[in-house]
Amino acid sequence: MGSELSLLDLVLDASFVVQLVLLILVLASVLSWAAIFDRGRVVRRARDAADQFESRFWSGGDLSALYRELGQEEKKLTGLAAIFRNGFNEYVRLRKIEPDDTMAVIQGAERSMRVALSREMDRLETNLPFLATVGSTSPYIGLFGTVWGIMHAFHALGNVQQATLALVAPGISEALVATAIGLFAAIPAVVAFNRYSNQVERLNNRYEEFMEEFSTLLQRQGRG
């Protein structure tokens, strides 16, 4: 309890600039934690949805039936389901227009799936740049607050005849709080950014592998 009070005293006694730096860092930390929880939920749901869709897709059922089933929940579709529906929808449309040009039909379906993949990656990567920004800039913002606080503490010594460590130590302690808060904001953001970037990349690879396999199935179906 004593350490908490002393920390609060350090913040309250700090200069206005240092307090402003601390406010920015605390706000960045709160927003980054909100982004961390949000990305965790989104990535987890995307992974679970991919597992469920692949189970349905590879169950051996009719693709047209699966396409119609997904049409009933089209507005909610994400991930593999959205990629499949976009690709199959374009495949069916182009088959009616160019029934004899299989390659053009397949290429059109692949382009449509690429568009769906791009949208999905944009959705999954939301807030990741913000986490990267917080992780890379927070230590420097905290360092700026520390340097300013130390400058302020030493400047105050100009008004005394005899400078002692006891006079400058409180000001330096107040300034060092900014560096500590900067690291407190940066470390979770960096860890979360690396973790979620890796998971999003793995999902992207999974989506692309599905697209290749689905394109192969469509080619076989087109020749059949």
Image (spheres, rainbow, N blue to C red):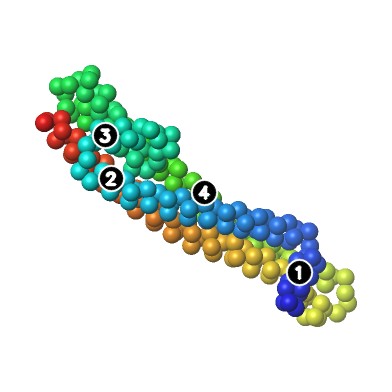
Using a 10 Å C-alpha cutoff, classify the residue at mark 3 as few (fewer than 14 neighbours), some (14 to 19) or many (20 or more): few
Using the numbered discs, state the Cα–Cα distance from disc 2 to disc 1 in whole angstroms: 56 Å
* Vertical arrangement, residue 156 with respect to residue 108, above or below: below
Front residue of this view, candidates 170 and 112: 112
Disc 1 marks which residue? 8
* Secondary-structure class at tag 4: loop
Please report the residue visible at 48 percent of the width from the left and 53 percent of the height from the top: 41
Q: Residue at x 18, y 39 (%)?
A: 216
The quadrant holding residue 80 is: top left
Which residue is under mark 2? 56
Marks 2 and 3, how far apart at CA:
11 Å
> Residue 150: x, y in percent?
73, 68
Q: Earlier in the sequence, mark 2 or mark 1?
A: 1
Q: Position of residue 63 (x, y in %)?
A: 24, 36
Q: Which mark is residue 127?
A: 4
Name which quarter of the figure residue 194 lies in.
bottom left
Q: Position of residue 159 (x, y in %)?
A: 88, 70
Mark pair 1, 3: CA separation: 63 Å
